[in-house]
Amino acid sequence: FEEPIQNDPKYFDADIGKKINQYNQKIRGIMEMPIGSSDTKIQKAIEENRDANLQESPLGNLVTDILRKNCATEMVFLNSGALRGKLEKGVLTNEAIFRCLPFNDNIFVSEMEGYIVESALETAASSRYGLLQVSGLTYSVDPKKPEGQRVQNIQVQGEDLNRGRKYSVAF
């Protein structure tokens, strides 16, 4: 596990550094433990020259699909900013997963009416906050349309979104 503190006296407190190093030694075995493998590199960004928070993400697809299955919901919304890094091809460790998902975020399961789902997608399509990573639904965005009309063709598990229906959602 990489040391998060540099030995720059301006920023380094030796006592705190010792405690961090002790903690790192305790968790090293857990962090280095193999938990799976991947046949390919799984990146956050599809196109490296674009802002990763403004595009669909292979890593986002993987994480949201796992959440949807484990939460047994119809759909999942995930903030693109929750994702960091990438998973390299080969053996996956706890550390690799932690580097991709370093925040201690809670997952909430709730019901959401279709019109609220549409509104959330519209807000994300404005690019002010970054694209939502999703599972269980598909949609298209026309950035040339005015706000409130950009999201089109919303389908939940292959069926048109019903604005009045309640859907199970993890977020």
Image (cartoon, rainbow, N blue to C red):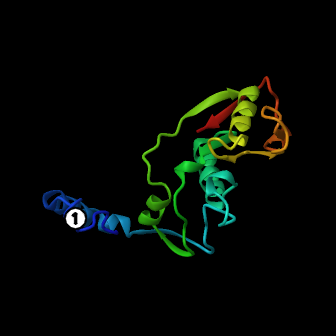
Image coordinates of residue 110 in percent, x first then y, are: 60, 30
Image coordinates of residue 102 in percent, x first then y, are: 44, 54
* Residue 55, picture quadrant: bottom right
Quadrant, the C terminus:
top right
Q: Amino acid at mark 1?
A: Asn
- Examine the rendered structure and indicate whether residue 53 appears above or below residue 123: below
Residue that appears at 39% across and 69% down: 33
The secondary element bearing badge 1 is classed as: helix
In the picture of the structure, the residue carrying the numbered disc 1 is: 21
Choose between 118 and 123: the one closer to the eye: 123
In the figure, is residue 153 to the left or right of 107?
right
- Examine the rendered structure and indicate whether residue 36 appears above or below residue 144: below
* Residue 59, picture quadrant: bottom right
In the figure, is residue 36 to the left or right of 118?
left
- Examine the rendered structure and indicate whether residue 81 appears above or below residue 98: above
Work out which residue is located at the far top of the displayed protein and give it. Answer: 164
Choose between 38 and 17: the one closer to the eye: 17
Residue that appears at 82% across and 35% down: 146
Count of labels in the image: 1
Residue that appears at 61% across and 67% down: 42
Image coordinates of residue 6 in percent, x first then y, are: 27, 67
Label 1 CA crowd tier, 10 Å (few <14, some 14–19, many 20+): some
Work out which residue is located at the far front of the displayed protein and give it. Answer: 10
Quadrant, the N terminus:
bottom left
- Examine the rendered structure and indicate whether residue 61 appears above or below residue 161: below
Choose between 165 and 103: the one closer to the eye: 103
